[in-house]
Image (cartoon, coloured by chain):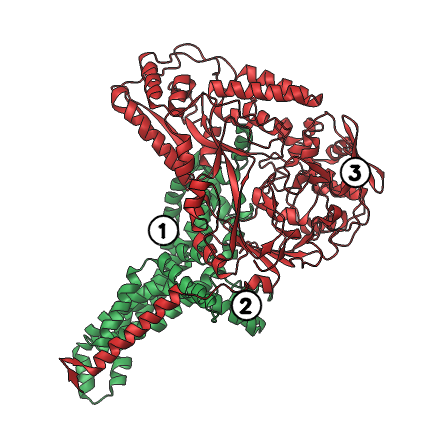
Chain colours: A red, B green
Amino acid sequence: MSKMRGISTTAIVAILAVLVVVAGVAWFLTAPPAPTKPKFVDENKLVYESGNTYQWMDPHVSYYQFDYWTLWQSVETLVWYERESPTELIPWLAESYTEIDPTTYEFKLRHDIEFQDGTPFNATAVWFSLNRLLIIDGTSGDPVYPVPGSQAAWMVQQLLDVSLSAALSGEDQAYDAAWVQAVLDQNFVEIVDDYTVRIHIQTPTTQFLPIMTGPWASIVSPSSTIAGDYEHGGWGTWDGNYVTYFEHRAGNGDTAFNVPEHGWKIGTGAYYVESVDPTTYKIVLKAFDDYWGGPDKINLPPAGKQRIETIEFVYQPSFSTRLLDLKAGTATGIGVPEVDIFSVADRDKWVNEGELVSIIDGVTVHGVFPTFNTWWLSFNTNVTNPDKTFRSWQPFADWRLRMAAACSINLTYANIFVNNRLSVLASNIIPPGTAPEGSYNPDVKPTFSFNLTKAAELIKDAYEHPLTSATDEMHYYDGTDIPPDVVDNSFSPTNPKYIEFYVQSGADTFIKMFTTMADNLNAISRRAYGLMWRVVIVPGGQQYTLASRHQIDSYIGGWIADYNHVIDWLIPMYLSSGTYFSWNRWSLKVLDDLCDEAVEADKAGDITRLLEINDEMNRIANEQLVYMVWWHDTEYYTRSSWLKGWYMNPVYGVDLWSSMYYESP
Amino acid sequence: MKLYEYIIRRLILMIFVLLGISLIVFYLARGFPSGIDPVTPYIHSKMTAEQIEMVRKIHGFDQPLAIQFFYWIRDILQGDWGITGTWANSRPTNVVFFSHFPYTVELSVAATILTVAIGLPLGIISALKNNKLPDHVSRIIALAGYSVPAYWFGFVLQLVFFYYLSLWGLPHLPSSGASGMEGVVSCITGMPVLDGILAGNLGYTLDALAHLILPAFSLSFISMGFLTRIVRAGMLEVLRQDYITLARSKGLTERVVIYRHALKNALIPAVTLTGMFFALLLGGAMITEYVFAWPGVGQISLRAVFQGDSNFLLVYTLVTAAIIVIANLIVDVLYVFLDPRIKY
């Protein structure tokens, strides 16, 4: 072996070989070829990957945003929205509709539409479908162990006799033959002829048509639905009598279509469900060849463009893996969490110019679009101890401490630099675009702003003059007044007290914001006054269970509209028996009275009055600082640039793929 | 004590062990003061306080903890393992667990095979070529194996063997999932590779194998490192023994000396490690299953943790505890056959 200056030739060759390999690997990794046609284009398949999984695939049971994404590709309703519009309603499965009187609507149905199982769409199907929803009933909870009833039935039931609804009456229902007959006797859907139905509601409301756009109001094939449910339930053979079916179905949400491993073909939509894998959560939809196309075929691609044949919803919990799949061209679209937005979009362009530009070749980021949701900090009064006794320390019964908390953070800054500017700051709880037009009024502004000096003054005042009796908004849970000397909001360095912000784990943006608030407030009050603020992180959803037990001071709350109407906000948010007040134990009589007035205005169809009441309620809520409203989320959609004709409807936040097609970018 | 007596005694003790574990886990899951509210996975944010209380009553979560534990034990013994939350479609817990378990078994078996197939020879080579280049290379691989974070290594494997290879138009492995051909063959065992073999469908089997390679290798890389070191250390010690010198002096070939005399004794700690590794894997490799979207119990239990589903977590903990205890027992029994000196 020859040597050169003590180094053998073998060693030199080995070193050179390693260098060549390293250089090759570096080139391989850093200079890939230009993207080619993605695999899904060749297969005419749309693959959507997300970290979410479905809950229930029966449109009459489901109450979950992710389920709606699948359902909207497969089922349809009598009325729907004009493409991207959140307010303009158009007849869909109905050819036309007329308001005969405030409680009666007549729908002329389209002819020549088939369900995916080949049976005809007609008045009987409408009668069957809408009554099925009512018959399944439900509490938006869990009245039927182990599977819930319909979690969405209440939305239609509120238009009828609420005593027949477990959710709305709060009473157990018999779910026997008499109950079924009572539901049917409401004559919600009257069959006039094969292609005409009249829908009768018991209370006039401008909410009716928006409610009828929801997937809970989907029209499904009676024959396939009944056959599937009979087989699933082991009910033997159907005798052909719909009432018999309804008696089996009454109060029982355990249907054949919740987890349809072998799919279902019960809708009229562009895609039928081919399979659902309960272990991998993969959902496969296939194009319905005889799909009618929607009004004027707007739900199909333009002439000459090929419709996407297969849609796959793939559960991929790891965002990094989803991103690789998108870049490699094996996924058409992926779910991108807000904290990862800059893995797909240019940060500078977005933060500085408000323009969402993809940083991935062959990928487009569509957005941002408004959503019908609001986030806020909930202030709870009437907090109890874990042993259910009334807690004497009620910090957020004191307006001063609510305002101090609200003034402790710069929401504008937080929205830009913590939330990646992905929301619209809220003036009040009503998001933009809420129907009727005018419901969203940005002039009804928050009464707080970032002001640490004001926060300090308020805390000092609360320290020097603590609340020592219950406020008007407070009462015991049985409704009785709280006597004097029960509430003791005094605090000091020798009598330190805590105020806690509860937030769910994984909600990084909210955790950062609460941490900032706590830091700012602690700098003011911890040493000087013995008032300490802290952030408590709990598993997802637990802040709600604790709030519902009235055991926490505050938590981050959010509401997303069930359907686009302002009443869907006012009642849950402001009525003392509504969802959030039932947790926070607020009881503002003035808001209760205004809720009643709002309902009356809605019944009378008096939109002007309804909007006035809406403004007044929001003004009162802002003045009282019932909620520290933060923002309304916006949404963005990361899709392959090969996907053309893209659009979404913000009411349910889904993009409907049936009219889209593939073409080179 | 005879072997069968020993086994029976251990099985009886296992019952007490599991009871003790279930007590501890039950308290942590349902009773710990700052713990998870057990009703959490069954509710959502649009329910009123009254509706949430109704759900709490239906599931018995309003009962005293001791009563809840009694009913839970009774139900478990009757085969009712409770209901998962809405995140798992409110299906029975045992249905959810056992629908995912075969995937974990398949991944565990594959990872263990790879661990032994690579780790064992590496350890032997390392011992035989002590302090030479093969030993150094082997030890670097072993060090990398137990130093590298599992999630990072999984991502690197995806990056190289899926992303870059596909970008260059080269044959590549799938990024995630257990199969790309769902529904093609019937589910018999729930393990895609085995189902493909049983169905005689070569395409499906190869597809399932392709999906298995990256997660299995990612998992095995960690344990491979440990196994290599254990085998190396064991072999080095055994090779220093007098009877090995005697064997060589008798003129036996090196192959016979190593594989018939030395390896068997060096394997005892390796058997322990492999057995425990396999048992731990059967409890689900959460990170690997998460990265590769492998539908095993690790992934599903991670979701249960995030959802606060105490029903599922209780069952999951009990089953994995039982697996570990049984694996320990099997390993202890194997010792008897590997080393005749060992008696119980």
**Where does residue B341 sit, x and y in percent of width and height?**
25, 71
Q: CA distance from mark 3 to mark 1?
A: 69 Å
Q: CA distance from mark 2 to mark 3?
A: 53 Å
Could you tell me if residue A313 is visible in this image? yes
Could you tell me if residue B83 is visible in this image? no
**Residue drawn at x 45%, y 41% as measured from the top left:** A353
- Choose mark 2 or mark 1, whichever is in front: 2
Q: Amino acid at mark 3?
A: Ser
Q: Residues within 10 Å of mark 1 (few under 14, many from 20)?
A: some
Q: Amino acid at mark 2?
A: Asp
* Residue position for label 1: B17
Which badge, 2 or 1, comes first in the chain's sequence?
1
Total numbered labels: 3
Q: The residue marked by circle 2 belongs to what chain?
A: B
- Which residue reaches farthest right? A193
**Where does residue A591 sit, x and y in percent of width and height?**
56, 18
Relative to B17, say whether A501 is above or below: above
The residue closer to the viewer here, A108 or A357, is A357
Q: CA distance from mark 2 to mark 1?
A: 35 Å
* Residue position for label 3: A96
